[in-house]
Amino acid sequence: MTGLWTVMAAVAAFIIASVMGIWLVPFLKKIHFGQTIRDEGPQWHNSKQGTPIMGGFMFITASIVSGTVCVLLYHAFGIQETPLMTAKLFAGMFMAAAFGAIGFIDDYIKAVKKRNLGLTALQKLLLQFVVAIAYLVTVALFGGKTETFIPFYGMLDIGILYYPLAAILIVGVVNAANLTDGIDGLDGSVTFFMAIFFMLIASYISKMGVSILSAALAGGCLGFLLWNFHPAKIFMGDTGSLYLGGFVCALAFAMDMPIMLILVSLIYILEMFSVILQVLYFKATKGKRLFKMSPIHHHFEMCGWSEMKIVVMFSLFTILCGALAFIIVVYGNYSVPSFAG
C-alpha cells in the first residue's frame, strides 16, 4: 500500500508538468520571456535565441503539488512518520523552492532587464547560503542530529563541523546543477535518474516520505522533458536548475546521506569542477585552455558530439553512479530502521 503513494506522486507530477507546457510555452513567448544567448557560448546555440525560459515552473509546480498531496495522504492512510522526518520533507521542499526563487530573480533580470548575466556571483552566493543555513537551522530545531552515513562504517556524528560542511555542500551542488543546464534535455535527464535512485534507496531503508518526493521530482522532470528534449521548446532557466539542485540536496539530507549525494550527483560536480579547472589552468598558463570550452558538456559539443549523444552518455554515467550508490547503501553497513521516518 505504501508504494501506491510513490507511484501516484510520479504519475501526478508527470501529468501536471506535461500539461502545463501546453499553455506555459505560448504564454512565455507572448510576454517575451526568452533566452539571451551568451556571446562566449557555442556559435550554433545562437539559433536558440528567444526560446522561452522559466520552464522550471513546470516541474516545480508538479513536484511540490504532487509531493505534498501524496505525503499528506500517506500520513493519513499509511504509517505516521516522526516529526523530524516530516520537518525534513517540508523544509526540504521549501529550501528547493527558495533556491528556485533566487533563480527566478536571475531569470527575470535576464529576460526583462536584458542583462544576460543576471544576478552577480556574490549576490547569488549570499542568498544561497542564507537559504541553506535556514534549512539546516529548521531541521536542527526539530531535533536533527549531526550524524551522517559513512559507507562501510555506519553513522558518524561529526559535531559542529556538520553545519558549515553541509551548507557548503548544498550551495556547491545547487550551483553545479545550474552549470549542468547548458544543452537541451541534459539537466532534466540526469536529475530524473538521480531522483529514481534516491527513490529506490529511500524505499529500501523505509523512508517512504523521501521515496514519494523523489518520485514526484522524477515525474516532474519527465513531464518537462517532453518540452525540453532537443530541439527544446522551452528552457528551465535558473528558476528550474537551482530548484533541482536544492531538491536533490533535500532528498539526500533527509536520509542523512550527504556522501551519497556526492556520488549520485557526480555529473553535476564534474560539470562544476570542469569550470574551476578551466579557470585555474587558464590563469596558470596565461591563456591556454584545458578544455575546448567549459562546462564540460560544451567541450564534448566542440569535439563533435550531438546534444542528444551528450544527454545519453551523461545519463548513462548518472545511472552507473546511482547504481553504485544503491549497492553501497545495501552492503555498506547502513542500519535499516524497522519503521518509516
Image (spheres, grey):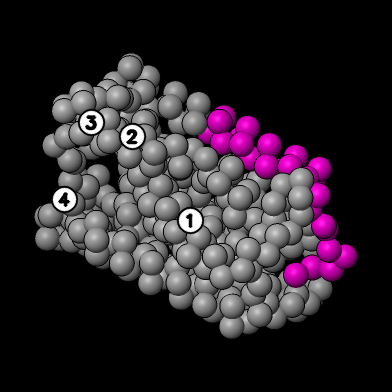
Query: On the picture, is 87 further left or further right than 137?
Result: right
Sequence order check: which comes first, mark 4 or mark 3?
4
The residue under label 4 is which amino acid type? Answer: Asn
Q: Disc 4 designates what residue?
A: 116
* Dot 1 and dot 2 residues touching (CB under 8 Å): no
On residue 284, the disc is 3
Q: Mark 3 vs mark 1: give the one in front.
A: 3
- Which region shows up in magenta? 315-341
Residue 340 lies left or right of residue 195; in this view the side is: right
Is residue 105 shown in magenta? Answer: no
Q: Name which quarter of the figure residue 86 lies in.
A: bottom right
Camera-near label (4 vs 1) is: 1
The amino acid marked with disc number 2 is Leu
The residue at 50%/72% (across/down) is 135
| Quarter of the rendering occupied by the C terminus | bottom right
Evaluate if marks 4 and 1 touch, with contact meaning CB atoms under 8 Å apart.
Answer: no
